[in-house]
Amino acid sequence: MDGFTAAELEVLDWIAQHLHTDLLDSIMPWISRLANSGGIWLLLGVLLMTLNRKERRVGGQVLLSMLLSLFFCNLILKNAVGRLRPFVQNPLVELLIAAPGDPSFPSGHSSVSFAAAAVLMLNGSKGRWAALVLAGLIAFSRLYLYVHFPSDVLAGAALGIVCGLLSRQIWTYGSKRYTLRKS
């Protein structure tokens, strides 16, 4: 094990030793599950698509950002890097959730959460700050649950923000092209 991985395990061990409580042990798995398969963010994107024109645009961007996150994070980077999860490297840890079977880097939960939150922030949407806090909680839950290293979560969040930015750019470009063709 290299020094960087050892340092990251120390961070996770510190969280486990100093922040775990019975209450958080019951809440953190639930918070993490909100982003399983993009869950809460998929629901938000679909809900926004059913509202007025402005919110429909934001909902479309949320869904597109999720698709970009899935592609870059889960299909490309996780498979290219193939990093073992922290609980594999420290088998003494008792997990509070079922052990994920895919590679660790980057965190898909963090990526999809920050992708959706970035879209909401960029569009000045109502609830954007709540979405950002929720994205942060979901990302932290992955550390708390010992299923991701800090660098997995940070890379996932950064990738998610890029996917959110890219989603907005693609949507704006596509909308302009569609408007020009229509006129």
Image: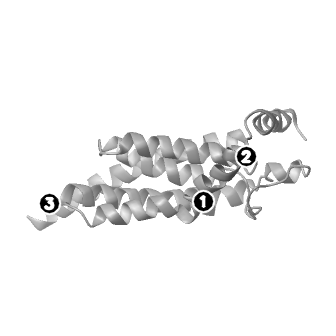
Q: Amino acid at mark 3?
A: Leu
Residue corresponding to mark 2: 22
Report the residue at 84% width, 53% height from top.
94
Look at the image and tell me whether residue 165 can be seen: no
Badge 3 marks a residue whose secondary structure is helix
Circle 1: is it few (<14), some (14-19), or many (20+) Cα within 10 Å? some
Mark 3 vs mark 2, CA separation in Å = 58 Å
Mark 3 vs mark 1, CA separation in Å = 42 Å
Q: Amino acid at mark 2?
A: Asp
Mark 2 vs mark 1, CA separation in Å = 18 Å
Nearest the eye: 39 or 114: 39
Residue corresponding to mark 3: 180
Q: Amino acid at mark 1?
A: Arg
Circle 3: is it few (<14), some (14-19), or many (20+) Cα within 10 Å? few
Numbered label attached to residue 92: none
Q: Is residue 69 left or right of residue 74?
A: left
